[in-house]
Image: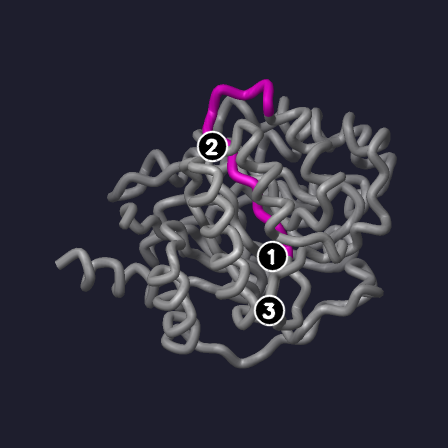
Amino acid sequence: MKTLTILDGGMGRELKEIGAPFSQPLWSAQALIEAPDFVSQAHQNFVDAGAEILITNSYACVPFHLGEDLFEQRGFELAALSGELAKAVADNAPHTVKVAGAIPPPFGSYRPDLFKVEEAAPIIQTLYDAQDPNIDLWIAETICSLQEFESIHAVLKQSDKPCYYAFSLEDTKGDSANIRSGESVTDAIKLACQSNAKGIMFNCSVPEVMDQAIIDAKQVIDELGCDLDIGVYANNFAPISSEHEANDMLQEMRELDGQGYLAYAKRWYALGANIVGGCCGIGPKHIQALADWKRSIRG
């Protein structure tokens, strides 16, 4: 088995939890604009819990959340700040912490039907250019279609840093796993194996659907003989519908505590995942449970 690495948790909900300025549609970008110290504190909370990778707070640095005008005026600046803040916390951590630059969905989460290839390219490039000086690796998050993967890969292939592609899954269990476009995880992993990917991940989906995605991914990886890390960071949400309107309301939460989340994580690790963390609603207490478990199995 590969060494287990602990990823951080959900930034937006942690910012809200610690009292950062937080409203729709700005979401996690509001703290970058008005009170960046809260962003540093949220990162620190995850480091203190045992996270070994911090994801930059750039998820909402897109026109979908900022609006076209603010993105044009300050999108680069805010995404760059997200990298600087994460790096400062990582550099002062008591253990080794790497910083992952986030490439988020340009047109809102969970909606592959809203993706526009030509409009996406300059947004992704801006996020890349802004964060690159301060990050150790890339994580393209919440990818919901193969078209979206290919658009992001067209930018990330210029990087010599490790690139991870995190797919968001349909929140329904079945004999095979699908990403939110209805396309199969199997096809997604085949594309990843042909790319510059260092690893693939599954994120911002309910914990119950992750097992099958890992199984499907592992089968493709083994069949093709490619060496990809597998990561999982589920959310703490109720299932998300295909008509989700990300800027209209906060998604309904479920009650899943640290030990409950750890029970899922142990299965993911047994199935072949070697990077585990959390997405929306998974906070420092959940990450602490993962880090404590890692120390126990390391002996």
Asked whether the viewer can see residue 58, the reply is: yes
Q: Which residue is mark 3?
A: 175
The Cα–Cα distance between marks 1 and 3, rounded to whole angstroms, is 32 Å
Q: Which mark is residue 137?
A: 2
Residue type at numbered disc 1: Gly
Check disc 3 and give the amino acid type: Asp
Q: Relative to residue 60, is residue 299 depicted above or below? A: below
Q: Pointer 1: what residue?
A: 12
Residue 247 in picture, x, y percent from top left: 80, 58
| Marks 2/1: CA–CA distance | 21 Å
Q: Earlier in the sequence, mark 2 or mark 1?
A: 1
| Crowding at mark 1 (Cα within 10 Å: few <14, some 14-19, many 20+) | many
Seen as rendered, the residue at the extreme front is: 223
What element does badge 2 sit on?
strand
Q: Secondary structure at mark 1?
A: helix
Q: Position of residue 292 (x, y in %)?
A: 26, 64
